[in-house]
Image: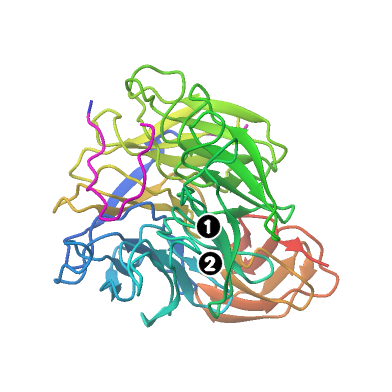
Amino acid sequence: MSKLRLPKMAFAMFALCVGAAIASPANTIFTSLVSFDVSNGSNPYYASLIQGADGSLYGTTAYGGASEQNCYGNTCGTIFKITPAGILTTLYKFDFADGGYPEAGLVQTTNGNFYGTAAVGGSSGYGTIFKITPAGRLTTVYEFQNSTDGGNPLGALVQARNGILYGTTSYGGGNPCACGTVFKVTLAGTLTTLHAFVGGGTEGNYPEAGLVQGTDGNFYGTTANGGANGYGTIFKITPAGTLTTLHNFDGTDGANPWAGLVQGTDGNLYGTTTYGGTSSGCGAFGCGTVFKITPAGTLTTLHNFDGTDGDNPLGGLAQATNGTFYGTTSGDGANNWGTVFIITTAGTLTTLHNFDGTDGGNPLGGLAQATNGTFYGTTYAGGTNGYGTVFSLSVGLGPFVETLPISGKVGAKVIILGTDLTGATSVRFHGTAAKFKVVSKSEIKTTVPSGATTGYVTVTTAKGTLKSNVVFRLRK
């Protein structure tokens, strides 16, 4: 059984214990778009791609880029964009002074810029928060100092309803165990530590993933270690910083959740654990699980991986427009290089693709569904040069639109992302007409109209009516 082959990280982190129609594999079309070659980046890590306002996909690689080896003997990583057709442009190459090892994906904020985290680098070496324009101009927004404010951020940021960014650091924070933090940071770079994990009791420690803001306004996340049983936790934290542990993993129901959560349309939270579960197919540590948990903390294991269907999922899940969830496993499967899978909310799992090394291998990040209906993702290894790939996976789902942000008050500015928006004749918020401007075939600018209520946003074009992938929530 092939296990994931990852390089040793240069900084000391911690030791881990070790109802919808479902797509048919026969209906999927897998395409390798790009093989990284070091000069244009290498080894994308936990990063999931995101779609920008220009219709391209944006992401990071943990290594590669510059020819100099400034990051503890390694290259420092890149930021790139790639068109749906596979044309890749390297936007930025890190050099440690401005950060290094960007392991997480990006978030595009309402000001049009992208924000992200670098796991190392900056003046102290403990990582940075950065801003980058779509044209590739990077600015360091914040440099972590470790002992006081945390260090080594590995998860992506999320822009909350109040416009502020929220995230985690996997290390540091001032407590004796240096167990990581939850923080908020303004777009201008003013950072506030909301919580420093203490590493004892049921709290958990070492959050590797980012947060998700629930419909209740609270944030939800995972810790990779610690808790009552040492196998990690799921927690809730208010915008003011009050943390509640919702679940302590015990090994049989999963262990070591490295990925973050996603809130489904049913209001439950869904995620994966990298290890644990009830299968013995992967040795003592277990193959990992897929789970759902209510906001109140009731957890249900939906699937136990057994190796034949993949093992050790490190990426999170993505809920598609058909209501089912899509994800990846980092190893095993038919060819021992990992898989892409689909799973229903009831727990029926189907493997859609088995990587074989030549088309990529060991996908560490999750998938992103672009507004053309196709999924896009990355692999850490494999491909033509062995340094990872970008791929697409079509499962026959149609196009849709996406709003940025996904909630707002009457009069708030909203960007609508799509694929073929030229000639749009109508924009409606749950049936209420809104004034709008078509900026390009992939972008419409609008405002929330008076009389709008919570519901889907629709855009009418010559080819038909497109519906938003999630409900737009009206705020008072």
**Residue depicted at x 74% and y 52%:** 216
Asked if the stretch drawn in magenta spans residue 16, the answer is: yes
Q: Distance between the residues labelled 2 and 1?
A: 8 Å
Name the residue tied to disc 2: 418
- Determine if residue 344 is in view: no
- When the figure is inspected, residue 91 is found, relative to residue 40, above or below; the finding is below
Q: Position of residue 88 (x, y in %)?
A: 28, 68
Name the residue tied to disc 1: 399
Seen in the image, is 358 located left or right of residue 368?
left
Discs 2, 1 touching: Cβ within 8 Å: yes
Seen in the image, is 32 located left or right of residue 464?
left
Q: Where is residue 294 in the image (x, y as percent from the top left)?
A: 68, 37
User: Which amino acid lies under the numbered mark 1 shown in the image of this protein?
Assistant: Pro
The quarter in which the N terminus is drawn is top left
Q: Position of residue 20 (x, y in %)?
A: 60, 35
- Determine if residue 443 is in view: yes
Helix, strand or loop status at disc 1: loop
